[in-house]
C-alpha cells in the first residue's frame, strides 16, 4: 500500500475548516438581513466605517457561536478513527452540519423579525416567557407568510450550504490506519485550543469568556448591540447564568441609602382616602400614537390615532416625558403594579420572582380593599395569573370567566389568537367592578393592539389600513377605551375612583424620535380623577416612569405605612428631582436634569440632552450633572441587585 501524502492526512481538518468558513458566510448574510429588516432602527446615522466596526465585532461573537454549536460536527469530523471514512458516515456528518447550522440560521432570521418588539437579541428566557401560550404555531405561521422573503432566503442558503459542503473524499483502502488515526488525533489536539479560545473570545488568561455586554464595545448606541450579537450566542450564553450580580459601588449601606432608597415613608399625617384605584395597562399603547402628547410632531399637524384618549388627557394629569421600564409585556406588569423595573432580564422569569413581593394590590388589600386582576387571555397566559396572586390580587378574571358570563358574547368574542377583543372585555371589566365592594383596586391588561394586528371584522371599514400595520389596532383600542369610560362614568363608584392609564411597552414606530435608544421606551402615564375638582388638568413638565405609579397612588391616597417601590411619588416630587431608568442591551439609561446618561455598569458611555431628540451629540464629560447622575444611578443599581439577591423587596425584609 502506498504511503499517504501529508495533504491527504490533513484532509479531514481541511474539509472541517472549509465547511466552517461557509458557516461564517451564512452568519454574515443573516446579520445583513437583520440590519435591512430593521434599518429604520439600526440605520440612523450609520456610516460605512462604523458598520465595518460592528461587523468586525460580530466576528468575535459569531466565532463563539459557530464553535459552540458545531462541536458535535467538529468531533465527528476529526475523530481519530479510520472507520469513519465511508459514505454513510460522511452523510451523517453532512446531516449534522446542515441541521445545526440550519437551526442557527433560522434563529437569526426569526429574531430579525422579533427585534422590533424588544430592541435586543432573544435570550434563553424566551422559553419561560411563552411557556403557557398555546397559539405559538399560529403566530409563527402568520409571521412566516408576512416575511416570506426570509423563508426564501433560508431555503436558498440551506441549498447553497448543501451544494458547497466539502467531503474528505478518502477511500478506506487508501489509508494506513495507524498514520491516519494519529494525524486525526493530532489535528483534534491542535484545533482544540483554538476552539476554546474562540468560544472564550481570546487566547490570553486575562480574557474572561465574552458575554452579551461585550457587544457594547463595538457600538455607538445600545440598540446597535443587537446587530453585533447573534441569536445562538445570546441564547446559550444566558442559559443557567446568574441574572443579578451585586456591584460594589458603595461599601457603606447607609451612604448608599442617603443617595437612594426604595423604602418609602408616609409623607404626611393626613387620614387615608380610601378611593377606588383602577389601573389600565394597555397593550403596546406607546406615547407615539397619542396626538395630545405629540403636539410638536410634524410641525403641529400630527393628530395621532387616539381621539378618545386625547379627550381623556384634557381632563387628566400626564407628563411631558414619560417612559416604560421594559420592552415586553412581562416587564410592564411588575413595573406598573409592584414598582419593579426590568434590569437585565424580566423579573418574573428570574429566580428573584420567588422573593416576597408587595404591590398596589397587597398594600391596599391590607387596608380593606377588594382586589382583582383582569386579562382577556386564557388563565396562565404570560404568567400574569401567577404574578397577580403573588402580589396580592384576591381574584383573577380571564377568558374562561368571560365565557362563563351569559351576559356577554362568550367565545364568539375571542380574537382567534390571544384574548377576548378589547371592546367587549372592557365592558365586562366595568360591569364586574360594579359588582365589587368599595373600596376596590383592580387592574386590566388589554390585548387587541398586538400582533398579529387584526381588528374585528365589523370595524375593518371603520379603521382601514393606514400608516403602519398597528395603527388600525390603536384606533380600535382607543374606541374601546372611550366606551369603557362612557360606561364607567354611569356607575356609582366612578367619582370615587383614581384611574391610571399606561402601556406595557411601546411597539412599531414610524417616527425617528421614537426609534432611538430612549424613544423606544416612551409610554404614556395618565392620571384621571373625575371626582376631584381642586386639581387642574395639565401635562406637567416632569419625567415619569411606570415604577412611579405605585408610589404616586400611595401618595394620592395618603397611605399611612412604609412601603417598598423603586419609583417615586411623581406628583409630590419637584420637577428637577424626577427621573427615569431603563435597561437595554447591557446599558442602563438614566434620565434626569434634562439629559439621559448611558452607563455600562462600569463607565458612562454617553450623555445626551433630551432636546437632542435623535441622540446625535454625545456630551460625555461636558455636563455638570454627570457625576451626580452617575452616583445616583449606581445607588439604584446596587440597591436593586442587593435586594433581588437577598429577598428584600418589602420594607420589613432584612439582610440574610
Image: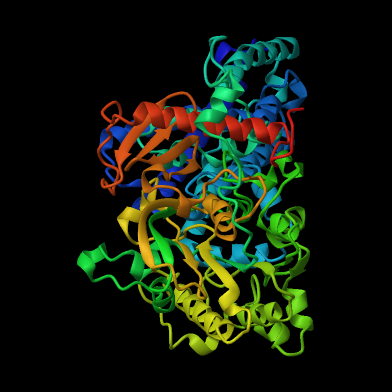
Please tell me which residue is depicted at 77% across the width and 24% down the height of the picture. Answer: 83
431 is higher (above) or lower (below) than 156: below
Its colouring scheme is: rainbow
Taking the spot 40% from the left edge, 47% from the top edge, the residue there is 574
Query: In the image, residue 272 lies at what x, y percent?
Result: 64, 60
Total marks placed:
0
Front one among 49 and 420: 420
Percent x, y of residue 422: 58, 77
Instruction: Using the rendered image of the protein, determine whether residue 19 is visible from the camera's viewpoint.
Output: no
Q: Is residue 66 left or right of residue 441?
A: left
Q: Quadrant of the N terminus?
A: top right
Q: Is residue 652 visible?
A: yes
Establish if 227 lies above or below 37. above
| Residue 40 image offset from top left, x and y in percent | 34, 53
**Residue 401 vs residue 639, the one in the foreground:** 639
- Residue 305 image-quadrant placement: bottom left
Q: Residue at x 69, y 81 (%)?
A: 434
Determine the residue positioned at 26% across, 63% down.
297
Q: Which of the pair 637/632 is nearer the observer?
A: 632
Query: Is 168 displayed left or right of 26 in the figure?
Result: right
Side of 58 where 238 appears, left or right: right
Q: Position of residue 605 (x, y in %)?
A: 38, 29
Amino acid at each position: 500500500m502506498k504511503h499517504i501524502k501529508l495533504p491527504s492526512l490533513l484532509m479531514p481538518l481541511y474539509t472541517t475548516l472549509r465547511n466552517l468558513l461557509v458557516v461564517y458566510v451564512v452568519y454574515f448574510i443573516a446579520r445583513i438581513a437583520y440590519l435591512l429588516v430593521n434599518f429604520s432602527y439600526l440605520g440612523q446615522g450609520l456610516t460605512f466605517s462604523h458598520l465595518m466596526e460592528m461587523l468586525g465585532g460580530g466576528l468575535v461573537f459569531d466565532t463563539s457561536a459557530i464553535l459552540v454549536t458545531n462541536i458535535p460536527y467538529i468531533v465527528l469530523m476529526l475523530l481519530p478513527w479510520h472507520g469513519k471514512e465511508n459514505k454513510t458516515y460522511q452523510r451523517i456528518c453532512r446531516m449534522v452540519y446542515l441541521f445545526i447550522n440550519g437551526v442557527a440560521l433560522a434563529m437569526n432570521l426569526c429574531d430579525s423579525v422579533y427585534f422590533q418588539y424588544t430592541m435586543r437579541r432573544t435570550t434563553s428566557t424566551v422559553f419561560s416567557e411563552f411557556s403557557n401560550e398555546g397559539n405559538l404555531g399560529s403566530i409563527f405561521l402568520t409571521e412566516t407568510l408576512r416575511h416570506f422573503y426570509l423563508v426564501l432566503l433560508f431555503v436558498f442558503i440551506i441549498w447553497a450550504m448543501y451544494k458547497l459542503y466539502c467531503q474528505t473524499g478518502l477511500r478506506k483502502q487508501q489509508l494506513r490506519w495507524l498514520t491516519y488515526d494519529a494525524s486525526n488525533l493530532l489535528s483534534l489536539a491542535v484545533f482544540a485550543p483554538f476552539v476554546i479560545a474562540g468560544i472564550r473570545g481570546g487566547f490570553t488568561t486575562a480574557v474572561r469568556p465574552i458575554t452579551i455586554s461585550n457587544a457594547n464595545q463595538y457600538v455607538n448606541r445600545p440598540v446597535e448591540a443587537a446587530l453585533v450579537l447573534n441569536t445562538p450566542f445570546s441564547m446559550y450564553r444566558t442559559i443557567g447564568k446568574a441574572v443579578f450580580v451585586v456591584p460594589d459601588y458603595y461599601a457603606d449601606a447607609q451612604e448608599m441609602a442617603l443617595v437612594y432608597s426604595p423604602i418609602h415613608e408616609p409623607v404626611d399625617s393626613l387620614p387615608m382616602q380610601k378611593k377606588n384605584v383602577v389601573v389600565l395597562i394597555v397593550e403596546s399603547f406607546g406615547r407615539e400614537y397619542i396626538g395630545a402628547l405629540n403636539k410638536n410632531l410634524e410641525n403641529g399637524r400630527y393628530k395621532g390615532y387616539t381621539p378618545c384618549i386625547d379627550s381623556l388627557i384634557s381632563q387628566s394629569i400626564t407628563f411631558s416625558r414619560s417612559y416604560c421600564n421594559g420592552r415586553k409585556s412581562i416587564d410592564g406588569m411588575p413595573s406598573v403594579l409592584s414598582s419593579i423595573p426590568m434590569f437585565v432580564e424580566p423579573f418574573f422569569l428570574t429566580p428573584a420572582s420567588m422573593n416576597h413581593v408587595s404591590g398596589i394590590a397587597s398594600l391596599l388589600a391590607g387596608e380593606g380593599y377588594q382586589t382583582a386582576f383582569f386579562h382577556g387571555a386564557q388563565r396562565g397566559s404570560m404568567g400574569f395569573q401567577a404574578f397577580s396572586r403573588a402580589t396580592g390580587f384576591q381574584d383573577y378574571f380571564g377568558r374562561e370567566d368571560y365565557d362563563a358570563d351569559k351576559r356577554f358574547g362568550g367565545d364568539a368574542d375571542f380574537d382567534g389568537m390571544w384574548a377576548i377583543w378589547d371592546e367587549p372585555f372592557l365592558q365586562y371589566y366595568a360591569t364586574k367592578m360594579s359588582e365589587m365592594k368599595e373600596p376596590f383596586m383592580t387592574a386590566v391588561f388589554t390585548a387587541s393592539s398586538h400582533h398579529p394586528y387584526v381588528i374585528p371584522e365589523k370595524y375593518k371599514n371603520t379603521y382601514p389600513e393606514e400608516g403602519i400595520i398597528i395603527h388600525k389596532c390603536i384606533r380600535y383600542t382607543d374606541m374601546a377605551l372611550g366606551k369603557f369610560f362612557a360606561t364607567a362614568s354611569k356607575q356609582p363608584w366612578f367619582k370615587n375612583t383614581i384611574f391610571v392609564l399606561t402601556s406595557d411597552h411601546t411597539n412599531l414606530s414610524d417616527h425617528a424620535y421614537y426609534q432611538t435608544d430612549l424613544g423606544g421606551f416612551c409610554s404614556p402615564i395618565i392620571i384621571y380623577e373625575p371626582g376631584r375638582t381642586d386639581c387642574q388638568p395639565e401635562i406637567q413638565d416632569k419625567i415619569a416612569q411606570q415604577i412611579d405609579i405605585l408610589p404616586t397612588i400611595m401618595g394620592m391616597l395618603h397611605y399611612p405605612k412604609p412601603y417598598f417601590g423603586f419609583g417615586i411619588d411623581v406628583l409630590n416630587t419637584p420637577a428637577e428631582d424626577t427621573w427615569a431608568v431603563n435597561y437595554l442591551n447591557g446599558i442602563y439609561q438614566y434620565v434626569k436634569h434634562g439629559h439621559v446618561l448611558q452607563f455600562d455598569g462600569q463607565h458612562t458611555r454617553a450623555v445626551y440632552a433630551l432636546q437632542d431628540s435623535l441622540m446625535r451629540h454625545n456630551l460625555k464629560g461636558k455636563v455638570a450633572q454627570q457625576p451626580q447622575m452617575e452616583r445616583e444611578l449606581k445607588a439604584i443599581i446596587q440597591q436593586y441587585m442587593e435586594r433581588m439577591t437577598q429577598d428584600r423587596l418589602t420594607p420589613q425584609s432584612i439582610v440574610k
